Image (cartoon, rainbow, N blue to C red):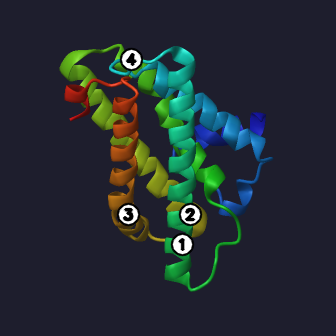
Amino acid sequence: MQTLIRDAFDVARFKVAPLAHYRYPVWQPLLWLALLSTAAALSAGDFDAPLPARVAFFVTLDLLSSIVSTLWLMGWLKLLDRKPLGASLFPLVVLAATPQLLQPLVSLLGGDAELVATIVLTLYGLVVLVRAVAVSTAHRAGQIVAGLLAYLPLALLQYGLAVQLATSFGWVAAEVAR
């Protein structure tokens, strides 16, 4: 686990190794993702659910999102290269989400500062993901950005379904969800 944590912070600092480097026992990226999801759940101020339900919701949402985005990117790279990748992108996708650990600090800002910091943190997370996938797979960053733009409609659908589900449970007010 110590290697994964070191790699997570290295990826967040744009120090990326070849894809074959990111091989861990399956439970380690899952545990790291659960930690990242818990940080997001704790900082979700407009989310009115009991803490265990909130954490379970965010863990499930992040797990599904990571799996789908990993499959999408692996399919995208297979399309570009005309051959499958030698290893899974899942651990790297999870590691690239490490900036999400800062979200509880951002939520302490409040108001417009919180909104600006959230946007900056989201953009930073996207840059980390693009750089990590590009460097580790030896592709140009533009190819990864194009793959993520092609994934955007599916990501928005996932987000919309998550908000709709949370709203139906009464965890998010309908006017906040809009």
Name the residue tied to disc 3.
145
**Vertical relation: 51 (above or below) 89:** above
The amino acid type of the residue labelled 4 equals Asp
**Cα–Cα gap, marks 2 and 1:** 6 Å
Residue under label 4, please give it.
48
Classed neighbour count for the residue bearing mark 3: other residues with Cα under 10 Å, few (<14), some (14–19), many (≥20):
some
- The quarter of the image holding the C terminus is top left
Name the foreground residue: 58 vs 91: 58
How busy is the neighbourhood of tag 1: few (under 14 within 10 Å), some, or many (20 plus)?
some
Q: Residue furthest bottom?
A: 82
Residue 13: image location, x then y, percent: 52, 41
Determine the CA span between mark 3 and mark 1. 14 Å
Q: CA distance from mark 4 to mark 3?
A: 34 Å
For marks 3 and 2 on the same chain, the one whose residue lies earlier in the sequence: 2
User: Which residue type does callout 2 highlight?
Assistant: Leu
- Mark 4 crowd level (few <14, some 14–19, many ≥20, 10 Å Cα): some
Gap between marks 3 and 2 measured at Cα: 15 Å
Q: Rounded to the nearest whole Å, what is the CA distance between mark 4 and mark 2?
A: 31 Å
Badge 2 is on which residue?
A: 71
Q: Residue furthest front?
A: 168
SS at badge 4: loop
Residue 71 drawn at (x, y percent): 56, 63
Q: Within the image, what quadrant is residue 30 found in? A: top right
Name the quadrant of the N terminus: top right
Residue 174 visible, this angle: yes
Task: Residue at 56% x, 38% y: name it.
Answer: 60
> Residue drawn at (23%, 27%), measured in percent from left and top?
176
Mark 3 or 1, which is nearer the eye? Answer: 1
